[in-house]
Image (tube, helix red, strand yellow):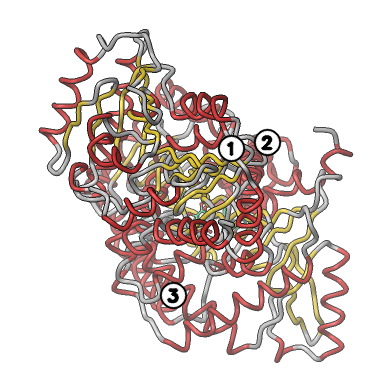
Amino acid sequence: MSRAAEKGRGRLVIVSNRLPVSFFRRKGQLTAVESSGGLASGLRSLLRRRDFLWVGWPGLATDDLSPREREFVAGELAERHCRPVFLSRSEFDGYYRGFSNGMLWPLFHYFARYCSFSDAHWRAYVRANEAFARAVLDAVRPGDTVWVHDYHLMLLPAMLRAGATRLSIGFFLHIPFPSSELIRLLPRRRELLEGVLGADLVGFHVYDYVRHFLSSARLLTGHEHRIGRVWLREREVTVDAFPMGIDFGRFSGAGREPEVAAELARLRARVGSERIVLSVDRLDYTKGLPERLAAFELFLRRYPKYQGKVCLVMLVVPSRVRIVRYRELKQEIDELIGRINGRFGSVGWTPVHYLYRSVSFPELAALYRGADVALVTPLRDGMNLVAKEFVASRESGSGVLVLGEVAGAAGELVGALAVNPYDRGEVAGALAAALAMPESEQRQRLAMMRPRVEHYGVSHWAADFLDRLSEASRRRSHRPGHLTGTRRARLIADWRRARRRLVLLDYDGTLVDFAGRPEEAEPDPGLLRLLKRLGSGERTRVVIISGRPRTTLDRWFGATGADLVAEHGGWVRVRGRGWRTMTMAGTDWKRDVRPVLEDYANRTPGTEVEEKELALAWHYRRAESRLGEARADELCQVLVELAAGKHCEVVEGNRVVEVRNQGVDKGAAARLLIRRYRPDLVLAAGDDRTDEDTFAAVPADGHTIRVGAGPSRARFRVKSNRELRALLNALIGDDNDNSG
Ligand code: GDG
């Protein structure tokens, strides 16, 4: 896309806890410092090509700023396309330190024992998210896209949706999304999940987190999902994995920078000819620092030949230092390093070089280039960019990455030596293997990883996410309007005016609730009365258009006078005539498909096979829901392959997978009936995918009604079959009132 076209696209509004520029007070003076964080630098090239606004916390609380200083901060930020969200010290404390980092961070990293929940923190979290929502809603213009980042702002997508229903909203979580077993421990879990589901697109680093999120959403909010889409009442949310990358060129090309060369020389002077094992992290208990030190200690004991020849350079960047747990961790690390250096060190050799500070980019790049081995063993990590930065920095082709298997990056970085970070012996062994590895193998392993890290860099990641977001938002904009108020009144007025009406009604789910077994869903006397009365006048033709076999429809609806369409359009019977089939093809395919469905029914408790004349169906309504879903996915794949080249096709309905004769669908039958009756009003109602074919056949001015949740091409939506029946009853009443 050209620069001008990108500029004309509406702004990208990024929302994150921190702005890419933070303010500090130095000797009384306010100073702005640019953040070198991955997100800020990663989005840099994208933001050069697009109008943007970044909304976030400016680094200082309202209590620490005079009104004039606040104005100054806002003005300085506006010049950099940023907008501050001002929070008081106590609000920020409860929201950031309390709920975000005292509850969500440990829980999402499987440290449930470190979690502390308090109502006051939760309230502060809600208030802070509301403050972010106000700032964003104040600033957005039609056509803008909002991209919300991370666990601090999980309520924000729903708050934005409530304030601006048409807004395109994306959410990305940078940390792991844990198993639903952990999520269910969380007070307010439902609110948080619903909060995230305000977005059109929800992104995670890896597919495991996607899976966990989808099953938590189903378990705790009751929202069903299919193929990565969560179905809400009026829209759907796409959920997918977008593994974040790095700025490959920056790390790969750093060798050409003189500052990096100077830093490398300084490092060499410090460690001499010793081989370097490198560790780089923010100070955090999820990074496994004490465990890593213990493994290094074991390595020195088990492989004494490396004593005096190898050192560990450990860069720990201070982080969240005002939280007690982090201060304790710092003390533990200090003590461990003291112990190792005291026990193994000598006058000429320091086993652990400890840097407790942040370093400049040239210094960091020099560490990545100077090291022989990178030891990256978090106990949990959403992704871990350090591992990717190390790989990118090794353009020489040598160097070994030892990587913990529970880092998100582990799935991509297949050339690493994978270890269990809790298994000291394994880590020590991997370290020894890395140091002994022949250079040819090092090259081979890096060559397995570098192209991937280069290709899916951070710009690619961001562009990919934003493309998918605009696709998801486009889909949302076609959504049925709720059939209430004026819409309902207008439909009734059209009904009243019409001379020839055709009413196409699906049965299961549309006119009645689903029953556990298909044969149990018999129509109730009230419904039969309704159908009879609806079609009793000259002006109205009623059609039951269902997936059921014709014998069932005859038995149930024969006396109502309605026309019947059976087996999803395979058979049609108009009043006073016999059944006509809509297909000439045979059903030889059943021979191959039947045993497969029976096998799935045998292996999956609560499921059964139904045989129809032109179709075979596997129902899983009564199966345990997760097992049913998983088997349905698997079965569909098997069936699609099996159906290739045969006269049949695979269709998914509401908790049913069906194989039926090709070219037979409710749409074809609906078109036939519309041609036959030439109605001036068509009303069609349905609740699942097969009814979408009916809707597609109805002229644009027809009244198509989706019953229940889920995306649909219908014009209108009603909540339930009860609401639809109430509407049909109202239409009958209206006919009677106006019968003269
Ligand atoms: C969260 C998730 C996920 C570190 N020290 C210095 C420095 N860094 C840079 C590194 C790297 C970044 O900080 C750290 O990123 P990580 O991914 O390793 O970890 P978190 O900070 O915990 O980040 C994580 C990430 O979000 C992205 O989604 O991968 O799982 O926890 O880029 O280079 N940079 C400089 N000096 C330092 O001293 N210049």
Q: Residues within 10 Å of mark 1 (few under 14, many from 20)?
A: many
Instruction: Provide the residue designation for mark 1.
Output: 393
Q: Image quadrant of ligand 1? A: bottom right
Could you give the CA–CA distance between mark 1 and mark 2, rounded to whole angstroms? Answer: 9 Å
- Locate residue 580, reporting x and y percent: 36, 19
Location of residue 12 with respect to 56 vertically, above or below: above
Asked if disc 2 is less than 8 Å from ligand 1, the answer is no
Q: Residues within 10 Å of mark 2 (few under 14, many from 20)?
A: few
* Depth order, front residue of 152/728: 728
Within the image, what quadrant is residue 650 found in?
A: top left
* Depth order, front residue of 649/358: 649
Tell me if I can see residue 251 in this picture: no
At 62% from the left edge and 77% from the top edge, which residue is drawn?
Answer: 130
Q: Is residue 684 left or right of residue 477?
A: left
Q: Amino acid at mark 3?
A: Tyr
Q: Amino acid at mark 1?
A: Ser
Q: Are marks 2 and 3 in contact (CB under 8 Å)?
A: no
- Locate residue 392, reporting x and y percent: 57, 36
Could you give the CA–CA distance between mark 2 and mark 3, rounded to whole angstroms? Answer: 34 Å
At 40% from the left edge and 17% from the top edge, which residue is drawn?
Answer: 582
Q: Is residue 257 left or right of residue 549?
A: right
| Image quadrant where one finds the N terminus | top right
Instruction: Provide the residue designation for mark 3.
Output: 326
Within the image, what quadrant is residue 574 found in?
A: top left
Instruction: Provide the residue designation for mark 2.
Output: 249
- Locate residue 606, reporting x and y percent: 14, 44
SS class, disc 1: helix
Could you give the CA–CA distance between mark 3 and mark 1, rounded to whole angstroms? Answer: 30 Å
SS class, disc 2: helix
First of labels 1, 2 by sequence position: 2
